[in-house]
Amino acid sequence: MEKEQADKIITEYMKKIYGFAYSKTMDIDLAEELASRIVMEIYTSLLKADNVKNIVSYVYRIACNTHSRFVMEEKSIKQMQIQKITEPKYHEHDKAKIYDKIRKEIAYLSSTQREIIIMFYYQKMKIKDIAQKLNLSVFNTKNQLYLIRNTIKDGLNQPKSNHNHKNIVFLKMFHRGKMGLQGRRCEEYFTRNLSQNISFSTYIKPKTPVEIAKELSVPVAYIEDELQVLKEYGFINKVGEQKYQTNIFITNYNKETQESIKDIFMQYAKLYCDLYIPLLIQNFETIFQNAQIYVPENDRNFLMWALTAYSNGVEVTFDIATDDLLYNHYTKRIDGSHSIVFAHVSDDFNNKIKTSNDRKKSKENTDFTAIISNFSKELKAAWIHFSKYDDREVNLFHKLCNWIFSTLYDFMVGKLKKDPQNINNFMHLYESGFIVSKADCQSDPERSEAEESTSDFVNLIVTTLSPKDFKALIPPIPDILIKINKEFETKLYHLTKNHFPPPMQELNKLMCHSTSFPINTRVFVLDHLLKTSILKPLKKHQKKTVNMILFTDVLPEK
């Protein structure tokens, strides 16, 4: 039956139902309680019924059945009261346990339900006054009170569970698209562990705040506050009237799937090294001798590291149509960002990063590239690839990158002098590895000790070529490798599709066919080239700035 028709019938029979309840109980309070139960039973039944031929008989039958159950409940309560006289009194600690259980169950109620129970039981307010204060109908208020009692009762009677919720940690977060006007990165909205756990809880299927609260063993009030912020910024969507579902692309593969993905990446990395790296080596000398490219210490190995990682992402043939479809999955947020947010999950809370060894271990899975282009006209852009091979802290680097590159530029053009007022600027340049003292590196036999102790050099690759012209120096990916790439992308999709909820299935398919294997296999390619000695291990001071290229209008002095 339609809701409007059911509402009409309830309104028509409301007074008659109350009259029936009062005739059976002869008590105003009991009559209100019985009438509210009858109305709820009739309303629920009407919504489920397809066609009711005799409304009067239908209503009367439900009212009689509800009254019978009500009488049985009253008898049970009286029997319990009689038993209470003869039973021994609870000890204080037993009472405390019961009160704690009740408080815990109340914490799992929604905000409206908590207000109703406080007003009714603690403030002793009447139903009609509560309804008026909360802007609810009397029927709705009575119905909520009935649901509250049953919810608390069910919670108290439920056997204690030994299950402990596993805390979820987002090991890696990044976004694809436009950053917000405030410049806040996506991970800055998820600094609280609760926001990460809520997002993961509502990822596979939508849930109500109460369901989330019980799963995470957290009061609903905290859940509702966190949900409000996540919903406001578009990280969680409201589904229907009560449920929420995460709007983040979360990868949470089991160990078996992770191993299978790793095998696929390693297979492709080997083919990439066999088919493409020889082409890069053929062009290497031309790139190394280019007068518009500065390589620190003229180190061929250092340049080869950068070219390998750079060619593994820049020279990808993207499917433009697929990329346009990806754009349709971007979310516009109130901070001005327009993007897809990605997160990689670990369910081992004890694996939080606490020591330098832990940080190093967590970086094993780090592999992404940042292209920064909102500099001045002189500083055109910067390309940076983060991986387990560098000593850069990703979050800290992003906070300082614009300022530190500008400071380096001042050093290169001679504006930054070693004066006391510039001591902090030099300190940051040294700590970031952007400039290095020759005294700290392997000494040059032909250079005097005095010259070594006072001479600094820029410790990253710099070019006056535009990104487009620099890219032109890189050999294109051969057609056979592009074909192989597509085959591996299809394998990846079929391997991972069962790990995503329905709203993310299409996005996962597009991601598998647009991000390209060269981008995802950079670290595996570097691993393979190290094993085959095409790349040599990095020097200590090179780990700060490896796989970094600055595009600008001036070169450092050699």
Image: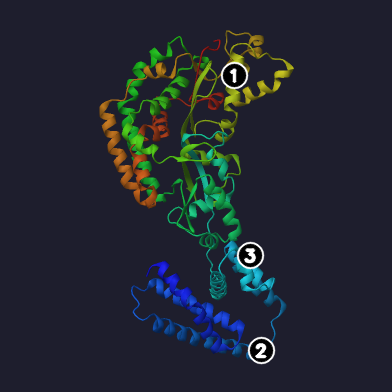
Residue tagged 3: 133
Residue 56, horizontal then vertical, whole percent: 41, 82
Q: Tell me if residue 334 can be seen.
A: yes
At label 1, the amino acid type is Leu
Number of other residues with Cα within 10 Å of mark 1, as a class: few under 14, some 14 to 19, many 20 or more: many
Calculate the distance from the C-alpha at mark 1 to the C-alpha at mark 3: 63 Å
Above or below, 108 against 525 in this view is below
Task: Give left or right: position of 533 versus 395.
Answer: left
**Element under label 1?**
helix
- Tell me which numbered mark, 1 or 3, is placed earlier along the sequence: 3
- Tell me which numbered mark, 1 or 2, is placed earlier along the sequence: 2
Label 1–label 2 contact, CB within 8 A = no
Residue 304, horizontal then vertical, whole percent: 43, 21
Q: Nearer the viewer, mark 1 or mark 3?
A: 3
Calculate the distance from the C-alpha at mark 1 to the C-alpha at mark 2: 82 Å
Choose top left, top right, bottom left or bottom right for residue 24. bottom right
Residue tagged 1: 408
Residue tagged 2: 87
Q: Residue at x 54, y 54 (%)?
A: 167
At label 3, the amino acid type is Lys
